Amino acid sequence: MEELQLRTAEMMGAGQAALNQAGTIAVAYSFSIVGAVVLLVAGYVVAGLAERSIYAGLGRFRGFDETLRKFFSKVARYALLVLVGVTVLAQFGVQTASIIAALGAIGLAIGLALQGTLQNIAAGIMLLALRPFRVGETIDAGNVSGTIQEIGLFATELKTGDGLYVLAPNSQLWNTPVTNYSRNSQRANNFAIRISYDDDVDEALAIMRDIVTKDERVLTEPAPAAYVEQLGESAIQLTIRYWTTTASWWQAQLDFRKAVKRAFDERGISIPLPQREIRYVRGAETMATSEPQRGDARQ
């Protein structure tokens, strides 16, 4: 009987000790749980505030791209949320060093797997920051040309002159020299035309100069310059260099070609075709053909 009472007392003591230990653990973990909940809520609120603050702060910089504002604000938010998550795990005694190392390894693996994509993102950020071209501008970058429709983090959308849709990776545009036809407000053009050696060079130059200078689209500074560019084998090449606004450059060029052709026809100034002089030798079965040059016989 006494032995039974002793065993009962021991069991009751062990149970009481277990209850005390469970209560201690419950109190400790309750504080951890409450602290984790507080950290999660506070971290979520702070991450949202940081996102909005960075988005608004970058908006104060004139010309800062909208896509970059969203990108950097989102990166800041998710970086804070990851930091909060690691801190919450530390509240429960989890070794965060191993978690950080695992996250680093996962990030490295993802980076290697998405190397091309990350290159496009980096190139997109540089394109949006440095702005070698903007939406609405016409560019030529290697085998890609057209008018910019949208600049994204991964790729850039263009529309060609004949209405085709082009999606170009940002890394390709960043690693290729870009010619921007719309960036500068003024643009020069060299309009060249050939006349016969029998025509009056001074008269032809005067006609070209008169047509160009009377057009309101042509700038007075720099002034137009007309000159003999080349003495060819069968014609004289005349050139006039003038400046216009970029917006009127293409149409002005088309109009000047038509106007000069009409004026030359009215003044009897010819635009010769390539010529070749052929000589026939009497009594010979062969025919000698000279290099193309000016002559009366034409073919």
Image (tube, rainbow, N blue to C red):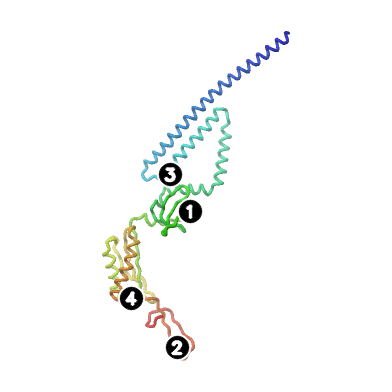
Q: Name the residue beneath numbered marker 3.
A: 68
Residue 140 position, x and y percent, is 43, 57
Q: Which residue is rendered at x = 70% and y = 12% of the image? A: 7
**Circle nearer the N terminus (4, 2):** 4
Count residues near mark 2 (Cα–Cα under 10 Å), then give few for <14, some for 14-19, many for 20+. Answer: few
Q: Residue furthest front?
A: 163
> Circles 3 and 1: CB distance less than 8 Å?
no
| Residue holding disc 4 | 270
Amino acid at the residue labelled 3: Leu
Residue drawn at x 43%, y 85% is 279
Disc 1: which residue: 172
N-term-proximal mark, 2 vs 3: 3
**Which badge, 4 or 1, is on the more N-terminal residue?**
1
| Secondary structure under the numbered disc 3 in the rendered image | helix
* Type of amino acid at the residue the image marks with label 2: Val
Image point 43% across, 79% down: which residue? 291
The residue where tag 2 is placed is: 281
